[in-house]
Structure formats: C-alpha cells, structure tokens
Amino acid sequence: MPDDAPRPASPTMRAVVYDAPRSLAVREVPRPVAGPGEVVVDVDLAGCAVPTCTSTRAASSPPSR
C-alpha cells in the first residue's frame, strides 16, 4: 500500500496510556469518534523527553498555570 493511501479503519488503536504515577503503558484502546465540532487527528509518530515522562512531579502533577 503506498504511504499516502488511506488506511482501513480499525475499531481499536495503539495508545500510550498514563495509568499510574510514573507508569506509561502501550495498550489497545477504542478508536475515538469525533463529536459535533470536533476532529480526530491521526498521529503516526510522537515523542516524549525522558525526564518529562519519567519524573515523579511531571508524571503525578497537573501542569502549573
């Protein structure tokens, strides 16, 4: 299949899930569905800086305003 060809829709997708302080896991989750006035963005690659993803404060506290 060419890189720019549409992919068949699947009812699930792989996602990185924050499931506890200092714990990220890759899981199969239901694919989101856009509601009125919303969009779903298909992300092929994403990154996270190791200190941000693994530090206790960053993983267990909401961002400061």
Image: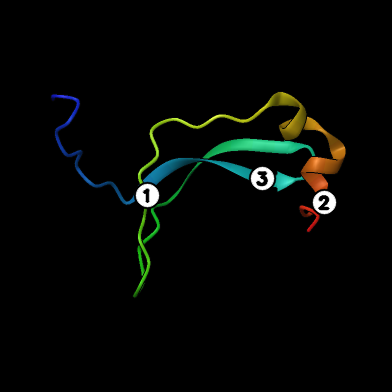
Look at the picture and state if 49 lies above or below 37.
above
Residue 40, position as x, y percentages in the image: 36, 55
Check the picture and name the quadrant holding the N terminus. top left
Mark count: 3
Q: Residues within 10 Å of mark 2 (few under 14, many from 20)?
A: few
- Disc 3 element: strand
Q: Earlier in the sequence, mark 3 or mark 1?
A: 3
Kind of residue sitting beneath label 1: Val
Which residue, given by chain and number where applicable, does mark 1 sit on? 41
Residue 50, position as x, y percentages in the image: 71, 25
Which residue, given by chain and number where applicable, does mark 3 sit on? 18
Residue 63, position as x, y percentages in the image: 76, 52
Apparent side of residue 39 relative to residue 53 in the rendered image (left or right): left
Q: Residue at x 81, y 54 (%)?
A: 64
Quadrant of the image occupied by residue 65 = bottom right
Kind of residue sitting beneath label 2: Ser
Kind of residue sitting beneath label 3: Tyr
Q: Residue at x 82, y 33 (%)?
A: 55
Q: CA distance from mark 3 to mark 2?
A: 12 Å
Q: Residue at x 19, y 42 (%)?
A: 8
Residue furthest to the front in view is 65
Q: CA distance from mark 2 to mark 1?
A: 26 Å
Q: Are marks 3 and 1 in contact (CB under 8 Å)?
A: no
Residue closest to the eye, 9 or 36: 36
Q: Nearer the viewer, mark 3 or mark 2?
A: 2
Q: Earlier in the sequence, mark 3 or mark 2?
A: 3
Residue closest to the eye, 14 or 59: 59
Q: Residue at x 37, y 49 (%)?
A: 41
Tell me if residue 21 can be seen: no
Q: CA distance from mark 3 to mark 1?
A: 19 Å
- Disc 1 element: loop
Query: Which label number is shown at residue 61?
Result: 2
